[in-house]
Image (cartoon, rainbow, N blue to C red):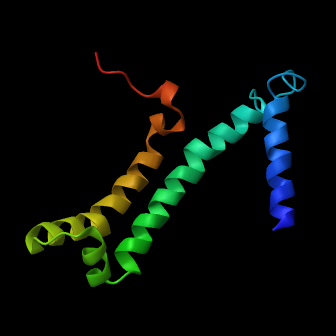
Amino acid sequence: MLLSGVALWLLSLGTVLSFNAWSEFTLFGKTFFDCLDYLTTNLLMPLGGLGTVLFTGWVLSRDSVQEALGLDQPRLFKLWWQVLRWVTRWASWWCSCTPWACSAEEAPVAA
């Protein structure tokens, strides 16, 4: 517990210092804050979402999920369950493999 608190404090200190004292130090052309932002946005958040989908669709029981959602319509829940189990994981994989998944600035803009 103490070790994780110290690690979090050091990461926080690094992000604060990247705006002033460490602003000239870059890694791959990014400051420490930008590296953590990139890592969080492009890796940790998608993996967290995929983990949630996989856990909900494949580990939790169908009845407990239906009860937690409060969906009383069996056909709607069955559709949601199939989308959760099959479509969502492939959609998240596809989104992570597209060229514009690297950053929001590189996303294609509709004309």
Measured as percent of width and height from the top left, residue 68 is found at 31, 73
Q: Is residue 47 left or right of residue 85?
A: right
Measured as percent of width and height from the top left, residue 63 is found at 26, 83
**Residue drawn at point x = 84 percent, y = 22 percent:** 23
From what the image shows, is residue 97 above or below residue 38?
Answer: below
Report the label total: 0
Seen from the viewer's position, the closer of residues 37 and 42 is 37
Image quarter of the N terminus = bottom right
**Residue drawn at point x = 31 percent, y = 81 percent:** 64
Residue 60: which quarter of the image? bottom left
From what the image shows, is residue 109 above or below residue 3?
Answer: above
Residue 85 visible within the image: yes
**Residue drawn at point x = 30 percent, y = 21 percent:** 110
Residue ranking furthest to the right: 21
**Residue drawn at point x = 41 percent, y = 81 percent:** 59
Measured as percent of width and height from the top left, residue 75 is found at 9, 71
Image quarter of the C terminus = top left
Seen from the viewer's position, the closer of residues 100 and 10 is 10
Measured as percent of width and height from the top left, residue 41 is found at 57, 42
From what the image shows, is residue 8 above or below residue 83?
Answer: above
Residue 27 visible within the image: no
Q: Is residue 88 left or right of residue 50?
A: left
Residue 20: which quarter of the image? top right
Residue 18: which quarter of the image? top right
